[in-house]
């Protein structure tokens, strides 16, 4: 399938990535993407940017080189209650796209039940659009429960290309994602593929994800990367369902 968007990427602002915002945007445009998400790590990981970085994202144009850009964050899930490492005010006012995930540097790994609860609470949060890399055997979770929550709340579960790389520090991603994707197929739950790029040459490169999706014959119609409108519709549904009395996501003309 043709991947038209990549919503999870990092620049030098994240502290352990190695390209600038402009370099990432140029790379994405060169690969023919229609939409790029730049999602710096929020506080909780060593060396990443502070709140002012997210507050000032308004200065970055949202269209460059004929491609749409969303600026956001990959926010840390800090505990079993799904507490996020970025204040609500910054999320609501400054982020176009909101990803949340568990990183063991700022999370005490618990039981399957505790880890699952942490992710479900994030899934239920209207400020979280995507759950990043729910695929690491070091942080065991109940995939049936996660997928059911994602379906109910229209929150997207990520198939992370970086997790499938042989150099990844995550464990068991190939097998875990097969389990998750089979449940998603059975329950007709859309997923999002992302590169989690930390350098420009990886932006828009879905080599490992493509092999996985083909191997298990996962339906293309359940992969939001095939359509920018599909992605935006899922985000809109999520925020409309879970947010009362707040401004919800609107697709710009």
Image (cartoon, grey):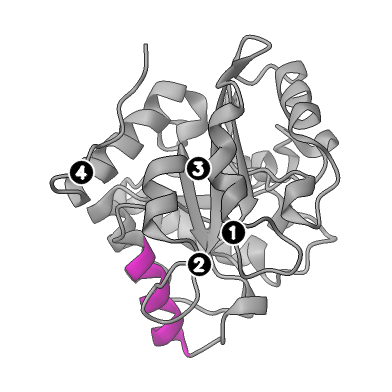
**To which residue does mark 2 refer?**
85
Query: Which of pointers 4 and 3 lies earlier in the amino acid sequence?
Result: 3
Mark sitting earlier along the chain (4/2): 2
202 with respect to 157 (left or right): right
Residue 235 x %, y %: 34, 38
First reached walking from the N terminus: tag 1 or tag 4: 1
Mark 2 or mark 3: whose residue is earlier in sequence: 2
The residue singled out by tag 3 in the image is 192
Q: Are marks 1 and 4 in contact (CB under 8 Å)?
A: no
Percent of width and height locating residue 62: 55, 22
Tag 1, which secondary structure?
A: loop
Nearest the viewer among 98 and 5 is: 98
Check whether the beta carbons of the residues at disc 2 and disc 1 lie within 8 A of each other. Answer: yes
The question of residue 119 being in magenta is answered with: yes
Q: Which range is magenta?
A: 111-122
Q: Which residue position holds label 1?
A: 42
In the rendered view of the protein, which quadrant contains the N terminus? top right
Question: Residue tagged by mark 4?
Answer: 246
Question: Residue at position x 82%, y 35% from top?
Answer: 200
In the rendered structure, the answer to whether residue 171 lies left or right of residue 153 reads: right
Q: Are marks 4 and 2 in contact (CB under 8 Å)?
A: no
Give SS at disc 3: strand
Near mark 1 (Cα within 10 A), the count class, few <14, some 14-19 or many ≥20, is many
Judge by depth and name the residue closer to the eye, 10 or 225.
10
Front label number (4 vs 3) = 4
Q: Of the residues tagged 2 and 3, which is closer to the observer?
A: 2
């Amino acid at each position: 399938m043709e991947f038209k968007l990549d919503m999870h990427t990092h620049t030098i602002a994240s502290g352990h990535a190695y390209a600038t915002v402009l370099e990432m945007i140029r790379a994405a445009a060169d690969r023919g993407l229609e939409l790029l998400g730049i999602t710096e790590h929020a506080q909780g990981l060593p060396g990443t940017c502070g709140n002012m970085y997210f507050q000032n994202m308004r200065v970055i144009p949202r269209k460059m080189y004929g491609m749409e850009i969303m600026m956001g964050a990959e926010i840390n899930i800090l505990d079993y209650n799904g507490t996020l490492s970025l204040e609500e005010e910054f999320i609501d006012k400054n982020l176009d796209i909101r990803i949340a995930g568990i990183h063991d540097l700022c999370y005490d790994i618990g039981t399957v039940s505790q880890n699952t609860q942490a992710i479900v609470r994030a899934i239920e949060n209207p400020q979280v659009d995507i759950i990043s890399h729910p695929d690491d055997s070091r942080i065991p979770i109940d995939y049936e429960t996660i997928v059911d929550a994602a379906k109910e709340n229209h929150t997207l579960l990520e198939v992370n290309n970086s997790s499938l790389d042989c150099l990844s520090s995550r464990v068991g991603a190939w097998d875990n994602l097969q389990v998750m994707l089979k449940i998603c197929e059975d329950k007709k739950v859309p997923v999002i593929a992302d590169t989690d790029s930390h350098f420009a040459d990886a932006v828009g490169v879905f080599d490992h994800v493509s092999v996985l999706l083909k191997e298990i014959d996962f339906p293309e119609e359940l992969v939001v990367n095939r359509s920018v409108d599909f992605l935006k519709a899922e985000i809109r549904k999520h925020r409309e369902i879970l947010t009362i009395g707040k401004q919800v996501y609107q697709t710009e003309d």
